Amino acid sequence: MRKIDEPKLLEYIQGTTEGRKLEFKPSLDWDDPNSKKLKEEIIKSIIAFSNIPTGGTIILGIDHRQDGSKIRYSLSGVSQVQINWIDEHYEQIEKQVQNFCSEPPNFEFVWGATNKLDKMGKTLRFILVIVNEFVSLPIICSTTGSQKEENKIDYVLREGDIYTRSYRANWSSKRCTAKELEEIIKLTADKHRQELKLRGYVKLDDLVVKLKEERSEYE
Amino acid sequence: MNNLNLNIVIKKIKTRGYWKLVIEPTKPVSNFFNHISEAEDLIENSSIKLRGWNYPHVPNENQQHQGIEIQNHRVNGFIIWHHFLEAWSFYDSGQFVHIFGLREDWFKESDWLTEQDHLKHIEPNTILDFVGTTLSVTEMLLFSQNLINNAKYGDSVRITISLHNVQNRKLTTIDPNRVPMFSNYMATTNEITGFEKVVTKTDLNDNTLLLAEETVIRIFKFFRGFNPPIQVIKDDQKKLIERRL
């Protein structure tokens, strides 16, 4: 697993807040059965970030709790043992993520360390999951996962869902609304248009634009 | 003096229900016309002459109610005459665009009809004629077939046929000799795209009537509750081809 330098790590964390392109999650032991729900929430966010322009980042090692209307973040970091485990089981993790995805998502785990964020000067380590936007086709959840709560038929991950970073609550990954689905379809269409251009079909693209302009008074 | 021009006619047509046909080349064609003046002949030679009024109408001269304009990169034709309102342009790219008003929307203002004629009493923007739809769609595709065969499109064209300003219209028949519709079949949308695809010259030559029939059925499905009678559509197409209308 690649290590990022301290200034880069601070760029991701200092003064930031969760939003459409950034999500905080607490540390986890990836292979611990008790972490299954949290693990699936991370996979859900990987799918969601894949489906928005330029992707986004999940930072592991930041807890949050609701304090009235405010959210309080606490930097707990992750352990070196957790970093090492992910490093040693990278392929297994990739396969687990892919198991929930219609297309392989383009993501990378990196880690970084700093002592500048802790009042006592203790070294804090974080794992970052850097997710890039999808390559050709948007990612659809292909497998149903765990129940959100016991005795409730609602799942963290559900087969057939398309997740995105929500416009309404941009700190979370949710099923697409109509507007968000439209964004994904446009992104897909643009990518395919670009691909046609790269393959030398530029003239065709230009022709479509020209013909549309030509008949503009009839539109 | 002729004050009528393309834009005036387009604006007037768009105030009520209208059809639109767009024929586009699927690849750039250099020197589509040897000279732009050829465009008018191509349309005239490709037009459909099966029921008293050609599709599309090509004005033979500029008059108060119609005009033909030859410009650098296109030829335009337009007419406002009784219940016939049409505007078309044929560009040197090969693109052909034609819009024309639904006749049923203009009967009321047509001097062609007398007060005794029931058509004269049809309120604009209220109905879509069942038979007129079949005939217009069939003519549009027959014309497209002729044009692709007569002009330098190559092997394929993109054809789009759409119907505009039809929300809440009732599908009916204006022919008094036909059994009327028993229910109110109302349009559920304002614009209907009946046909939009790239077709090869072979497909168009082999299946014109079938493509038209499928288009008509697709359009009728936008009229809630209506089950398109396929045999009636086929029979109306046959009567058109055999000039029995």
Image (tube, helix red, strand yellow):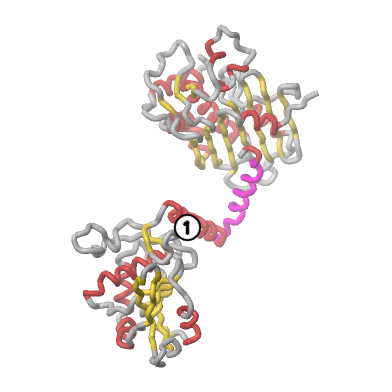
Residue furthest right in the image = B1
Kindly indicate the quadrant of the structure image that contains residue B43: top right
In depth, the one of B88 and B126 nearer the eye is B126
The verdict on residue A137 being magenta is no
In the image, A32: left or right of B237? left
In the image, B24: left or right of B222? right
The x, y position of residue B66, in whole percent, is 71, 24
Main secondary structure type of the part rendered in magenta: helix
Residue furthest bottom in the image = A121
A121 in relation to A126, above or below:
below
Residue type, label 1? Thr
Residue furthest front in the image = A68
Which quarter of the rendered picture does the C terminus of chain A lie within? top right
In the image, A146: left or right of A139? left
B59 in relation to B120, above or below:
below
The x, y position of residue B22, in whole percent, is 58, 37
The x, y position of residue A115, in whole percent, is 43, 90
Say few, some or many: other residues with alpha carbon within 10 Å of mark 1 (under 14 / 14 to 19 / 20 or more): some
In depth, the one of A65 and B231 nearer the eye is A65
Tell me if residue A65 can be seen: yes
What chain letter is assigned to the residue under label 1?
Answer: A
Kindly indicate the quadrant of the structure image that contains residue A42: bottom left
B55 in relation to B152, above or below:
above
In depth, the one of A85 and B232 nearer the eye is A85
For the record, the magenta segment spans: A199-216
Q: Dot 1 lies on which element?
A: helix
Determine which residue is flagged by label 1: A188
Kindly indicate the quadrant of the structure image that contains residue A77: bottom left
The x, y position of residue A212, in whole percent, is 62, 45
A46 in relation to B142, above or below:
below
- Which residue is depicted at the point 23% across and 63% down? A149
Which quarter of the rendered picture does the N terminus of chain A lie within? bottom left
